[in-house]
Amino acid sequence: MNKFETLGISENIVKAVSELGFESPTPIQEKAVPLLLENKHDLVALAQTGTGKTAAFGLPLMQMIDFGAKDVQALILCPTRELCMQITQDLKSYSKYLSGARIVAIYGGASIERQTEEIKRGAQIVVATPGRMVDMLDRKRVSIRNVHWVVLDEADEMLNMGFQEDLNTILSETPKEKKTWLFSATMPNEVSRIARKYMSNPAEITVGNKNQGAENIEHSYYVVHSRDRYPALKRIVDVSPDIFGIVFCRTKAETQEVADSLIKDGYSADALHGDLSQAQRDFVMKRYRSHNIRMLVATDVAARGIDVDDVTHVINYNLPDEIENYTHRSGRTGRAGKSGTSIVLVNSRDVSKIRIIERLIGKKFEFKKVPAGAEVFDKQLLNIINKLKNVVVNEKEIATYLPRVYEQLEDLSKEEIIQRFISQECSSLFEYYRKTPDLNADARGDSGNGSARPNANTKRLFVNLGEMDGLDDEKLKQFINTTAKIEKGGVLFANVKNTYSFVDVEPAQADAIIAAFKEERFKGRKVRIDDSIGRPSGSREGGGEKQFLFPALRWKQVRRFR
């Protein structure tokens, strides 16, 4: 007996679910499905990505929808095209044996005319991204004034992506007597406000604690100098030969740079970010899902909605600006009951943020050392040998070639053949890792660029460039010293933030550095360096104290209030 029957699911739906390989409901499904089938309550359900939330709301909908009618009875809103398509496909699978079921996906990047025609032919369930749904409503291509159910899936991510106004517009078009089901991985204040505004005494289901990370994900961090992030990433990947992972970067420029470097160095990788066309995004994701690439390098926004069950590793090349985005990043692994690993690369000044995340997700991080070259070589060698041992030999196919091979090797002993094989397979790997340096930084007091902040009398300057410009501490130091034509001294210490930076310079050279940048531009934007620490008006975001402090406040507020 399939255990989904005990939840009150009908025979035809259970049959479809069984064919998908589902035999036992997940915790969120066990709690949500019977409650939603009662159809008496609004619902707020909190559970990690990858815990089976689509079936938790999809199965009750399949049972309660009148598939004999053609009007829209249920609206499901989700943050991204990829998730929209995935939910639609899942619902179609659940309704395989339900006559007349029609589920239509509405999302940007596809023909709005084609989507309109699908709606006109009749659709009981519409799955939509907020932006395209607002567009369809404005053009009067779809009516949701008589929907019975509205589902907000990945509600926190929709708000993180700036869909607050769109959600308000859409929900205001729906009837008051509908049932609203809100599913989210975290419960920030914005999600709470939506629940209060659009829901009536909702029941609440929580799988794990609010904002807590999945139990089957291991969290670890490595402390490295900023200049050593990429070499450290390579070693972590090399010491995990079977990795199938996602590398998260902060900016589109950094994402492309890291992906290009990995490809150049022979890794199976590609980039996913907002500068790609929809066709390019689809092509990258198709290659990733089919395991034709093993490393996906992505920004937070581009990766939202990615639904791939067998991701083994999530690597945070940098910590996210929004602390709660860490939960979403790490939730891309450890899905469907599998185990996963979430790794963070930090410099010493960001180690305190690891403690904040620990309190947020309710799990401890393990501090790890970046593997030494000998350790990586040993791991790679054993991986080669294991592959050799497990290779499937097609004796029939190679039979005609074997006599000549045996003849060529008859003068060599077994030991000599093994030695030559290892030498051929591993010579370049051994040469690369033979003299590699220790990449571990001091977790107690590193500046992030390999040198402690000077204790001597220095002058601090503000710079309106940061990580968003593709800079790190070392790159900024080099840029300023080169532009100001300073061969000795100059920038002694750099502290690069997301949209701005501080540098400590020798007092005697401060005025010369400021003067050298009066007319200087970086990637087409005017550079400002001055000693007015505190109100960086003139930054590319429009300046002002609020923008200047915002990246730091997002972490300080958590430290203060949690």
Image (spheres, rainbow, N blue to C red):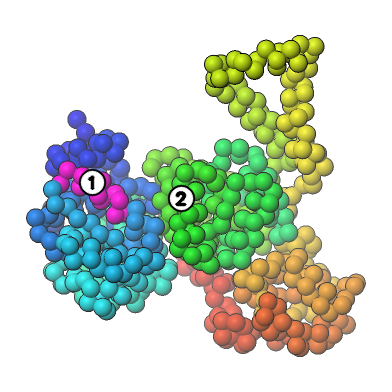
- CA gap, disc 1 and disc 2: 23 Å
Name the amino acid type tagged 1: Tyr
Residue sitting at 70 percent across and 38 percent down?
376
Residue 86 in picture, x, y percent from top left: 34, 53
Determine the main secondary structure of the stretch shown in magenta. Answer: helix
In terms of image quadrants, where is residue 115? bottom left
Count residues near mark 1 (Cα–Cα under 10 Å), then give few for <14, some for 14-19, many for 20+.
many
On the image, the x and y values in percent for residue 48 come to 38, 52
Q: Nearer the viewer, residue 402 or 331?
A: 402
Question: Residue 282: which quarter of the image?
Answer: bottom left
Label 2: few (<14), some or many (≥20) within 10 Å?
A: few
Drawn side of residue 523 relative to residue 89, left or right? right
Q: Is residue 92 magenta?
A: yes
Does 283 appear in magenta? no
- In the picture, residue 271 is in which quadrant? bottom right
The residue identified by callout 1 is 94
Q: Which residues are magenta?
A: 87-98
Front residue of 282/415: it is 282
Q: Secondary structure at mark 1?
A: helix
Q: Residue at the location (30% across, 74% down)? A: 134
Please identify, in this view, whether the residue under mark 1 or under mark 2 is nearer the observer. 2
Q: Position of residue 262 (x, y in %)?
A: 65, 51
Q: Amino acid type of disc 2?
A: Lys
Q: Which mark is residue 223?
A: none
Q: Which mark is residue 286?
A: 2
Q: Is residue 5 above or below residue 247?
A: above
